Image (cartoon, rainbow, N blue to C red):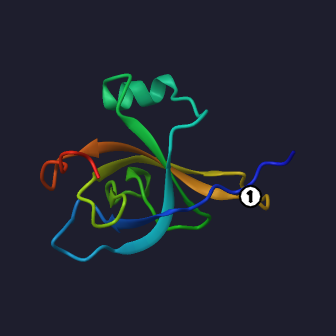
Amino acid sequence: MSYVLPTFNLNVNIWRNASGPPAPPAVTTIGNLAWGRRVQTGDVIAAIGTIGGAITLLVPAGTDVRDEGGGWGDDWVEVPAGSGRFYEVLWVDDIGKGFANEHRAAVLIKTAAFGQWPVPYP
């Protein structure tokens, strides 16, 4: 059985370099918050300083979501859009590059930089 694209079932807002609301997002797209069978490496643990707390955002191939590797700072995302659930992008890379199932992954860590998350979590 071949690997298929994930279902992109959530609307996503992306802001550049911690600009955040009330500014309008730089990018709006669709995505999927995933945990599944993916594993977090020691690099993730070192980056966030804890074993828990990171999650992966899957988005369509070519989606303009950025980590600090571009030299402009991390993006900030809200997933689902309008929910008040904000995350900082730790890093971005492609999955299935060059294949029909190509898509992009962004490792995220939740943040309260733009206010506390709503309770209960939407």
- As rendered, which of 4 and 45 lies closer to the eye? 4
Toward the left, the furthest residue is: 115
Residue at screen point 36% across, 60% down = 80
Q: Mark 1 falls on what kind of element?
A: loop
Label 1: few (<14), some (14–19) or many (≥20) C-alpha neighbours in 10 Å:
some
Q: Position of residue 30 (x, y in %)?
A: 49, 67
Percent position of residue 84, x then y = 23, 58
- The correct choice, above or below, for 72 with respect to 110 in the image is below
61 over 92 or under it: above or below:
below
User: Which of the 4 image quadrants contains residue 108?
Assistant: top left
Report the side of 84 relative to 94 (left or right): left
Spot the residue most to the bottom: 24
Q: Residue at the spot x=72%, y=51% of the render?
A: 96
The amino acid marked with disc number 1 is Asn
Residue 76's x, y, as percent? 31, 57
Q: Which residue is mark 1?
A: 101
Q: Quadrant of residue 109?
A: top left
Q: Quadrant of residue 54?
A: top left
Write the residue at 31% across / 25% down.
49
Judged left or right of residue 12, residue 7 is: right
